[in-house]
Image: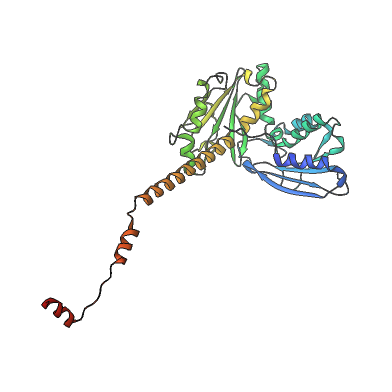
Amino acid sequence: MILLQSHSRYLLQILSNRVQNLEKGVELDCHWVEFDDVRYHIQASMKNPHILLLSVSLPTPPLETVFVGGLPTGAIEAMKAAYGLVVQILDPPRDGFNLTVKLNLSKLPPDEEYRNTLLVKIASVREVVMGAPLRVVLKRLTSRAVAQDTDQLVALVHRPMESFFLAPQAEKVTVVFPMRFKDSTDTVLATRHSYSLAIIQEFVEARRTAGLSNAPPCSWSPSPPLELKDAPAEALSTNAGFVSFVIFPRHVEGKKLDKTVWNLSTFHAYVNYHVKCSEGFMHTRMRRRVESLIQALDRAKPDTEKSKKTGQNRSFKRLSLQESRSRLKS
């Protein structure tokens, strides 16, 4: 299966082109939208070509999630730790956006490799902001301690008006995703055995594969698990059940933390992407099958051309009454 990249490819392309052509000072004004309704707007003027204004709009949070100043908990601290002096957070943000930052390209490091790494990190602003509260909870696993203010169910937004839940404990964190699909076909492909094993079922059985025995345990249930007993009822309405992952300290050690945060933050988008790919693949197979059946039917048709030609070669002459009588007498 294909993993989604943590950085915005379009944003990284804009930043890289801007750095390489900084002396040209071209005016810039771009809008675009990425999956889960994350919207971007980036601007630059000819007067200050090394200054960029980047605005980000996050998915609309449901009531059970907690936003501080329009951002997830810990997002400001995560931004400062990730970008340092290169990024300045503007308060208030631009209208219609949750976050607006000023990028000073003149403060990028001179080393090319380090500069490119920082540009990728800036293009990963979605991961830094939306993954901030999840990162805080998972970091505590390394010390095997649970803060007093997070020893209860935590709801985090990941799609418009949809959230997933964390149940933190000292030795593990259980992550539960209520799975919802707008298309009934997507629901069948994601949860039931149709063309092959359902996609969600593949996650449950992944630990049986050689080399994946240390992967986080995964389970699926059509009804809410016990960890969601305190969740609001409106957050538990699903049409594809609930997927649970159990994260242990070994899954967040060192560099594994960033990967775990991103994979969990985009899990629903990951499943939805592969559901659509599976649906497209099945449609392609069906079209090819129909085409082969049509060819077989065409080959099975009788050869009517020869019979038509045989009938056309015969000629008939209409005889008069006298000619017909004379021929009968003879």
Q: Is 31 positioned to the left or the right of 294 in the image?
A: right
Extreme residue toward the bottom, this view: 322
Classify 201 as above or below 63: above
Image-quadrant location for residue 139: top right
Q: From the viewer's side, name the closer residue of 90 and 324.
A: 324
Image quarter where the C terminus lies is bottom left
Extreme residue toward the left, this view: 329
Q: From the viewer's side, name the closer residue of 14 and 204.
A: 14
Q: Is 268 positioned to the left or the right of 46 in the image?
A: left
Image coords of residue 321 (percent x, y):
17, 82
Classify 246 as above or below 42: above
Q: Is 194 positioned to the left or the right of 75 in the image?
A: left
> What is the tally of numbered marks visible in this picture?
0
Residue placed at 52% from the left, 30% from the top?
A: 243
User: Can the viewer see residue 138?
Assistant: yes
Classify 94 as above or below 303: above
User: Can the viewer see residue 225?
Assistant: no
Image-quadrant location for residue 36: top right
Image coords of residue 163 (percent x, y):
59, 36
Image coords of residue 202 (percent x, y):
50, 29
